[in-house]
Image (cartoon, coloured by chain):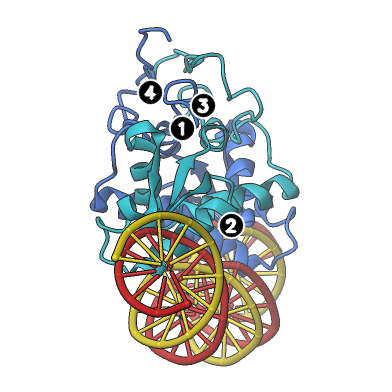
Chain colours: A blue, B cyan, C red, D yellow
Amino acid sequence: MSNLELKVIDQDGAAAACCSPMVREPLDEEAAVDLAKMFKALSDPVRLRLLSLIASHEGGEACVCDLTGPFDVSQPTISHHLKVLREAGLVGSERRGTWVYYWVLPAALARLSALLQAPAAAGGSR
Amino acid sequence: MSNLELKVIDQDGAAAACCSPMVREPLDEEAAVDLAKMFKALSDPVRLRLLSLIASHEGGEACVCDLTGPFDVSQPTISHHLKVLREAGLVGSERRGTWVYYWVLPAALARLSALLQAPAAAGGSR
DNA sequence: TTCTTGCTTCGACAGATATCGATACAGGCG
DNA sequence: CGCCTGTATCGATATCTGTCGAAGCAAGAA
């Protein structure tokens, strides 16, 4: 295997530096509790789709009115899921006049992504 | 913000090929349901620690007897969490004589990691 | 065989979660 | 001001989840 270290490019100087892959060393309990909250926010199909809708929306943000259409659930339920995503630190939001806009916080996703970096060829699967 | 594009270094040419980042295009419902199951398996602190314990264990695998010690929960509970991880496709297991061994399935982690690849500077965070 | 050890399954229960309709709040428009 | 629209919160409820102790199963030892 190459001797290149995987380097995650430092985005806006944030995140990604904090978390080496979990497959390299055991997580301590405190970190596990923290990370589990974020994964829990991702553990619902509606929230996953909301997140991807927001992220892939033009300008990187979307108002709630753009988000209620594609789903079969009621508007209060969408609002609930957005709150969960917000409280998990995965999205930010702001009211602008009549509408409320949501956008993804990339550092949070990057943190989780880095954590799950698999060793692939490294350790061998068995 | 900088105009640098975030480039994620291609690690060992593996994974990351199957799933483009969710921030690029909306997830369809079927994929969301499937992925949500995996994230749900990661949404518990005990399971996160179990996974990292298994992955970082010598040889890339660990028997259940190695996994019960570090936790405050009962052994049946550990067994339950291992089952959840297994049914989510995140780990494999095999009985070898007296002991049962678990190992991480790197492709599954890689898939999730790729999905969460953030565009960072690309779209702009707001 | 019987005993012991390692692990899984079972049954129960407390607490969390997803969902809804109803209601409240915030802001723009007459 | 009153009304309408967009969004959040409330209260209720059915389902899911994490946890336990007890019991079951598998494999080696005596």
Residue B72 location, x and y as percent? 25, 65
Say which chain tag 1 marks: B
State which chain disc 2 sits on: A
Task: Please state which of residues C24 and A9 is positioned toward the viewer in this rendering.
Answer: A9
Q: Amino acid at mark 2?
A: Asp
| Three-letter code, disc 1 | Ser
Tell me the crowding category of disc 3: few under 14, some 14 to 19, or many 20 or more residues within 10 angstroms, Cα based: many
Q: Amino acid at mark 4?
A: Gln
Q: Are the residues flagged by discs 4 and 1 in contact, CB closer than 8 Å? A: no
Q: CA distance from mark 1 to mark 2?
A: 23 Å
Q: Which residue is denoted by mark 4 in the rendering?
A: A11
User: Residue A9 sits in which quadrant?
Assistant: top left
Viewer-nearest of discs 2 and 3: 2
Q: Are marks 4 and 2 on the same chain?
A: yes
Lower position in the chain sequence, tag 4 or tag 2: 4
Visible residue check, residue B10: yes
Residue C22 at x, y percent in the picture: 64, 87
Disc 1 marks which residue?
A: B125
Find the distance from the CA under tag 4 to the CA under tag 3: 9 Å
Q: Is residue C28 above or below residue B6?
A: below
CA–CA distance in space, label 2 to label 3: 22 Å
- The answer to whether residue A118 is above or below residue B55 is above
Return the mark for residue B119: 3
Chain letter belonging to callout 4 = A
Judged from the image, the secondary structure of the residue bearing numbered disc 1 is loop
Relative depth, front residue between C9 and B115: C9
Residue type at tag 3: Pro
| Residue at the spot of label 2 | A44
